[in-house]
Amino acid sequence: MSTGKRIAYFLGLPILLILVWWAATLGSTNFYVPTPGKLVETFWRVWISNRFFTDFMPSIIRLFIGLAATIVLGVVLGVLIGSFRWLRSLFEPLLEFFRAVPPPVLVPLLMLLIGINDQMKIVVIISGAIWPVLLNTVEGVRAVDQVLSDTSRTYRITGMARLRYLVLPGASPQIMTGVRQCLSIGLILMVISEMFGSSAGLGFTIVLFQRAFAVPEMWSGIAVLGLVGIGLSAIFQLVERRVLRWYHGLREVQRDN
Amino acid sequence: MASTNSRMPSRRVTGPLLGAAGILLFLVAWEAVPRLGLVQEKFLPPASTVLVSLGQYLGQGGFWHDVGETMTAWALGLAISIVAAVVLGLIIGSSTFLRRATHSTVEFLRPIPSVALIPLAVLLFGAKLESSLLLVVYASFWQVLLQVLYGVADVDPVADSTARSYGLGRLARMRYVVWPTMLPYLMTGIRLASAVALILAITAELIIGSPGLGYQIGLTQSGGAVVEMYALILATGMIGVLINVGVRILEKRVLKWHASVRSEVVV
């Protein structure tokens, strides 16, 4: 496909949709839907201001701390549980249960246990987002190729070296699947944790706008959350392509054969 | 071989036993921590108190009414998003032009967290079932749509050409070639979506105040009824487990003929 065609495919439908939106709101005075121009103008006024430092950045920092802790904890615990059969049997039903608890119900619980502060918000993110990482790591570690495992044992590759060169790379495709799922849950929980008795942050701000019936401002907040989601998934794809380059290469070779 | 055979039964027995031991251990720890005063009982009531409260809930009509509200939002939202995603997925997936043209838009809309729509839902519908539905449908639709698109793209070209040369029409090919190829993907999508749908149904109740279990949890929290709050949280977890188990059974049934399930049975 030529570059021009590719760009046309990439931009065609979005431009069409924006045109429809613009045409539909052109003559109307609908209270709920702002025109595209108004939204962009509001977005600029509301978010490229002090609010960027008081509401946007703290939320994003909490999100990243929470996600980093989630991934580290999830992988460490997952490798541990996945490596020992008896640990896995011991924890399996418990983990099944904890995974099934809808994470937002933990917000009132953690508010009670920790209080309303930054730690609570970070713990909320960890407590909800860790399960996909943990369970996928367990599965990945468990399913490490038997031949590779036997071979490395024959060569007396044990301990940290085994972990570094066999277990982690072998489990990494599964781990990355878990990480991808944990990103969207983490973002959801970041927003929800700020909607409860908070006085700053993205979640708090859009609810504030909605309560004040500041509709264009509210839409601009929704747009910010959308952009954060898109940014996160873009970062993930970059990282995944780097980490799993060997894996995608391998798959391609297998497919060609 | 003989050694693995002799070890198999013991392993099959010890697995569930260890699992039960794990649950027991957890409950004992939960009972001990507040009893020993490591955490105050008003923040973490002992397990026995919470389980008794859960038992009381299970005997109350009001509790089951709330469960019904939550499950209605879950089931209705999931059904809407599955039907919409399958129809749209089949249409988009079977045309290269549509697939290319919609790719950027789908990738743009998909990562938008559905909780971002909470204020919109409040403005449009208020604390009603429709608010829950909006969030549930938005969250689960993308999960299913993406899997359907993968599934349709996975159709074996040889199978498709064969069906064509036997004179199968568009609809017949959809039914006998595309649908069976897509089904495993669709089931994966449904499995992911059913978990997400429960999260969003509860979230909508908790934050917007649509009727249901989430709303009750919010009430117990603001009313300081800590024991009841823990009991209700346990209840939501159990609903989640039931949904997961149910979907897995459904998946096995629907895909009985598929290699991925058959091999599990053989081994």
Image (cartoon, coloured by chain):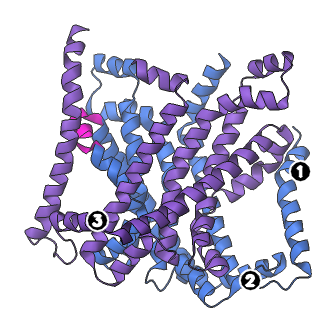
Chain colours: A blue, B purple
In percent of the image, x 56 and y 45: which residue is there? B190
Q: In which quarter of the image is the C terminus of chain B?
A: top left
Q: In which quarter of the image is the N terminus of chain B?
A: top left
Find disc 1 in the rendering and name its residue. A8
Sequence-earlier tag: 2 or 1: 1
Label 2 with label 1: CB-CB less than 8 Å: no
B134 and A113: which is toward the camera: B134
* Subunit of label 2: A
Report whether A205 appears left or right of B3: right
Q: Mark 3: give few (<14), some (14-19) or many (20+) Cα within 10 Å.
A: few
Q: Where does residue A159 sit, x and y in percent of width and height?
A: 26, 33
Find disc 3 in the rendering and name its residue. B59
Label 2 with label 3: CB-CB less than 8 Å: no
Amino acid type, callout 1: Ala
Report whether A56 appears left or right of B97: left
> Quick check: B225 above or below B108?
below
Residues at marks 3 and 1 on the same chain: no
Report whether B53 appears left or right of B68: left
Indicate the quadrant where residue B162 lies.
Answer: top right
Report whether B103 appears left or right of A128: right
Q: Mark 1: give few (<14), some (14-19) or many (20+) Cα within 10 Å.
A: some
